[in-house]
Amino acid sequence: MNPFIQSKVMTAEDVANRMPLQGTIATSGFTPAGYPKVIPKAYAARVEKEKLAGKNPWFNLYTGASTGDELDGVLARTGCMKKRLPFQSTPDVRNRINSGEIDFVDMHLSHVAHYIRDGILDPIDVTIVEAVDVSSDGRIWLTTSSGMSRTYLHHAKEIYIELNSRPPIELKGFHDLTAPEQPPHGRSVPISRVDDRIGRPYVVVEPDRIKGIVLTDLDDSSGEFKAPDENSVLIAQHILEFILFEIKKDRIPKEYLPFQSGVGNVANAVLSCIAKDSRFHEIEMWTEVLQDSIFDILEVGKLRCASTSALTFSKAGHKKFLDDINELRYKFIIRPQEISNHPALVRSLGIIAMNTALEADIYGNVNSTHVAGTGMMNGIGGSGDFARNAYVSIFMAPSIAKGGAISAFVPMVSHVDHTEHDTQIIVSEQGLADIRGLAPKKRSEVIIEKCVHPTYKDAMREYTKDSFATAKTKHTPHNLHKVFDWHIKLIETGSMK
Amino acid sequence: MNPFIQSKVMTAEDVANRMPLQGTIATSGFTPAGYPKVIPKAYAARVEKEKLAGKNPWFNLYTGASTGDELDGVLARTGCMKKRLPFQSTPDVRNRINSGEIDFVDMHLSHVAHYIRDGILDPIDVTIVEAVDVSSDGRIWLTTSSGMSRTYLHHAKEIYIELNSRPPIELKGFHDLTAPEQPPHGRSVPISRVDDRIGRPYVVVEPDRIKGIVLTDLDDSSGEFKAPDENSVLIAQHILEFILFEIKKDRIPKEYLPFQSGVGNVANAVLSCIAKDSRFHEIEMWTEVLQDSIFDILEVGKLRCASTSALTFSKAGHKKFLDDINELRYKFIIRPQEISNHPALVRSLGIIAMNTALEADIYGNVNSTHVAGTGMMNGIGGSGDFARNAYVSIFMAPSIAKGGAISAFVPMVSHVDHTEHDTQIIVSEQGLADIRGLAPKKRSEVIIEKCVHPTYKDAMREYTKDSFATAKTKHTPHNLHKVFDWHIKLIETGSMK
């Protein structure tokens, strides 16, 4: 530990006592990797104490994306979280968003840095990041995620650091930190290969802005890795067949295009299937989160390189990462979310984007965020950054949920995150619908035929027939009287059936 | 006229007789400038004759964007147009889309070239473009628009040209024609200033693929230019005040950012107001269509340069263009729509995008295309290409239409073209709502307060109150029972009141 760090060391309670009781806190952390783990708890304790003392504490929380309960959970439970952005997946935050207590700003992850730089969002009072090392000249080496940290550090009035000795010091060098040149006359980001490095492995700040360093020794609280279930494997198989078909048709080059893969079971299943399938050879990943499934690809020698904004591994995955860290330094690259999710790079690199839909409708509109139109699940995250500009954009969803009480395919989605203009391929375990270049009515035929669960097919066909008969104009037939009947039934009876 | 042209000259009827009776026709033309004007009429006559003779002719029509009645109208009226893309604004096409006769694929204009190159759309049998000159080595100089012509020429089995002597031969040199490098490993498009030239002023094809040239002498049938009405000027004033405020806040640089401006009255009013307002100095345009209002800016010496995909002038505007054509050669640059609308360039140049909304809802979702959820107006055009990636994205709409029978602001839009994540500023003649960084409920307060017409304000407030009270989850409160009541009333009674 260098003398600079020694001079800044304090306890989490010290930091909590110096933080403002009303203001905006920005932190490291991305889906959930590399977030601060001890200062939030101490700050929450202070906030609760001051509330009991009759004061009126409140704070906004800005992060990269979702974080752990040690940050999001403890802070939400104070009841003093006023605004939260840009993404979350913690039950106590979600519940308070949906009760109307917390104002949640559900943003494209690539937009956050611009909004911070331009002062569109409330200014940041305190930025807290997790780091593996800090130098006396103000260089900060981040841990398992990059997310928004660079921008939040640049724009904070005061900086606190959780110096965590648990993540390997060898993370120094994994990051590639920079920001795009700004308009007017900003040149395009000069990345044309997945592993191009254009920035620095650390963030630099004025050393006197670092007001305190708290020493920790804690893992990210990532969940256990689950083996893909049967439906996820079926979805993955449909996607693999589609990619092979597109290669045969010369629409995807033989060396493939870089893959982006959302978070979760289905995304993991796709990568596991690529690892096992002898028809697939070396691939590249350009994505925002790497999960355990990357090791399936690595173990069979099929990963050329992977660009991400976070490493989100289970305990077992983390061990594999540690075992091979010196080799993986040349395979993995961790970027700010403004770069990993940059629409221009997604377009020019020609990404194959694979994201999960909460529900999709018969015309190809996709809902990624809202349950029955009004309740927030997690947020749009990076799905819009990727899907809108991808070379091939795939949305995936099991056709039914809750034992069949919910159909993921509905007459009209109750909230639109990705429009009919942006969706290309929609897949369920039933099959794959390629809706590129189709007019709405043709799309509805393909989606019903290929994706809808058999128990909902007749009802869906009846809806389209009725809509075509009753709509005065028939480009996108709908019966506005009945369009949300399935959702209303779900709200009122617990089932769409 | 060079010998090569002479050797290819034929009549429109000759061309019509050589064209297939079933297949895909692609043409030049963008909103409506530079489209073929005589071959379509001859082909329509042949199609109708063959239909009467018991044959089964049909064709798909691909263009850059909207065209004139001489192309879209005459072909639609044959009743044999099967598929149309990517945009249209001709009554006979619109009506047949909405009756269910024509399959319309409503696409982002920047996506078309990719879909053509990759063979996702039906292959092109015949491409017809309008040109001012053709050389014996296969160079083709386009007329008043670029649109999709370069790509359609490259991918056509057979090429026919309408050589039009009416547009000035000096158009040679206005175009900058190229395509982005393709994935994988395509580098970004190397444009960092609005007037950077990176391509050729002509398209090159193998000369023997040019099967015939028809000589014409006809103007584009563009409408008369209307002076902005009172509401358009009010909307424009709100936008100007906003831009000046953003400059004061250091969010827009003092030299501004390039402006993109949609088609129509309101867009024209904004440019006219910039021309007249002494607080505004020189500007740059990065847009897809230049209309007469550009001359207001030029005449006061306030235009530095303008990049577009089409020149759509009235007769009076066209005269101004001719008068100054040798100077304008250094101010205007005409690009393929794949470049003018390229999301990466829109992001890196930092565009101020201004587009018209058909309707917007209280949470900031925007409908640009569908009347009452089912009927197509014109299409999304370039609005998604620009709005999604702009530095500042502004949607504009008069708060009411049809003498107050329709409110442009509704509880939930009946079709989503731009999601809540993409919209930033919404303006009506009533005022301007800045919804950046706001949670949904805050957005609804600002939009109702600033934009909704007074006659609809109470009803809207009642809707939000009822939604908040009845929704089980309250991130985006809605009452799904009532969400489309205004639209249903409109369909059934002709008024939302």
Image (spheres, coloured by chain):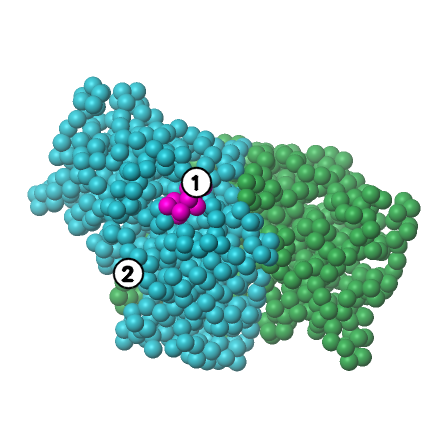
Chain colours: A green, B cyan
Separation of disc 2 and disc 1 at Cα?
Answer: 42 Å
Residue B299 at x, y percent in the picture: 37, 46
Residue B419 visible somewhere in the drawing:
no
Residue B342 in magenta stretch: no
Residue A296 pos. (x, y %)? 65, 42
| Numbered label attached to residue B305 | 1
The secondary structure type at the circle numbered 2 is: loop
- For mark 1, give the secondary structure: strand
Q: Residue at x 74, y 45 (%)?
A: A203
The structure residue drawn at horizontal position 57% and vertical position 65%, both measured from the top left corner, is B438
Image quadrant containing the C terminus of chain A: bottom left
Q: Which of B249 and A2 is in front in this view?
A: B249
For disc 1, the neighbor class at 10 Å (few under 14, some 14 to 19, many from 20) is many
Q: Residue A115 carries which label?
A: none
Residue kind at label 1, given as amino acid type: Cys
Give the magenta part as a residue range. B297-306
**What residue does disc 2 label?**
A474
